[in-house]
Image (tube, rainbow, N blue to C red):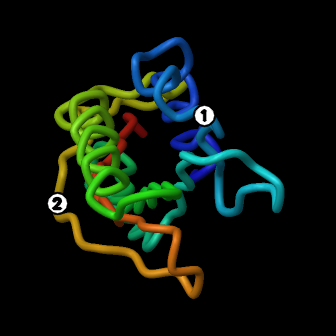
Amino acid sequence: MIAQVAQGIATKYSGSALATLLTGGLWREKAKDDVAFPYAVFTEVDDINGATYASDVEFHRIQFTIWAQYTSAVTDAQASLDVLEASLRSLFDRAKLTITSWNNPAMLWDSSRPAYSEDDTIVGTHIDFVTWIDKAR
């Protein structure tokens, strides 16, 4: 079902303020090698399937990673990263995704932490969300 959740994320992202800020775009699983900075990648960390007597339920943990590059000062890149994270959280925290044939009550922000690169000019942050989807049986 991650394909439908991924489509819901892409639909929510399309045309948003975040889409304007992420000049390199939002990618599922892996960005192209030559993508421009800043950009973000999202992936499913885990997926738990369940059911009740009346409905099918899936719980998903989605991790977004934003990457930015600096050319002069780390503080400038970090400030940019802070703005990007705030924009991503504003777009997705407590947001309902449009997922065909499924109900999505909301995505909820769970945590954020630094992401590290072997390239000293690249800074990043991981932002985790949890969400669930359900549909009547």
What amino acid is found at the position of numbered circle 2 in the picture?
Answer: Asp
Sequence-first disc among 2 and 1 = 1
Residue 129 figure quarter: bottom left
Viewer-proximal residue among 101 and 84: 84
Look at 43% across and 67% down and name the residue there.
Answer: 123
Q: Mark 2 against mark 1, which lies toward the viewer?
A: 2
Along the viewing direction, whichever of 38 and 126 lies nearer the viewer: 38
Q: Position of residue 108 (x, y in %)?
A: 19, 46
Q: In this view, does 23 lie to the left or right of 113?
A: right
Residue at the extreme top: 15
Instruction: Answer whether labels 2 and 1 touch (C-beta < 8 Å).
Output: no
Above or below for 52 versus 12 = below
User: Callout 2: few (<14), some (14-19), or many (20+) C-alpha neighbours within 10 Å?
Assistant: some
Give left or right: position of 7 versus 61: right
The 10 Å Cα crowd at callout 1, few under 14, some 14 to 19, many 20 or more, is: some
Q: Which residue is drawn at 33% across and 59% down?
A: 59
Residue linked to disc 1:
7
When asked about the image quadrant of residue 95, the answer is top left
In which quadrant of the rendered image does the C terminus lie? top left
For the residue labelled by badge 2, is the local secondary structure a helix, a strand or a loop?
strand
Mark 2–mark 1 Cα distance, whole angstroms, equals: 21 Å
Direction from residue 11 to residue 126 in the image, left or right: left
Q: Which mark is residue 87?
A: none
Q: In this view, does 120 lie above or below 96?
A: below
User: Element at badge 1?
Assistant: helix
32 or 34, which lies in front?
34
The amino acid on which the numbered mark 1 sits, given as a three-letter code, is Gln
Query: Looking at the picture, does residue 130 appear above or below residue 15?
Result: below
Front-lying residue, 126 or 77: 77
Q: Name the residue under label 2.
A: 110
Residue at the location (23% across, 32% down)?
Answer: 105
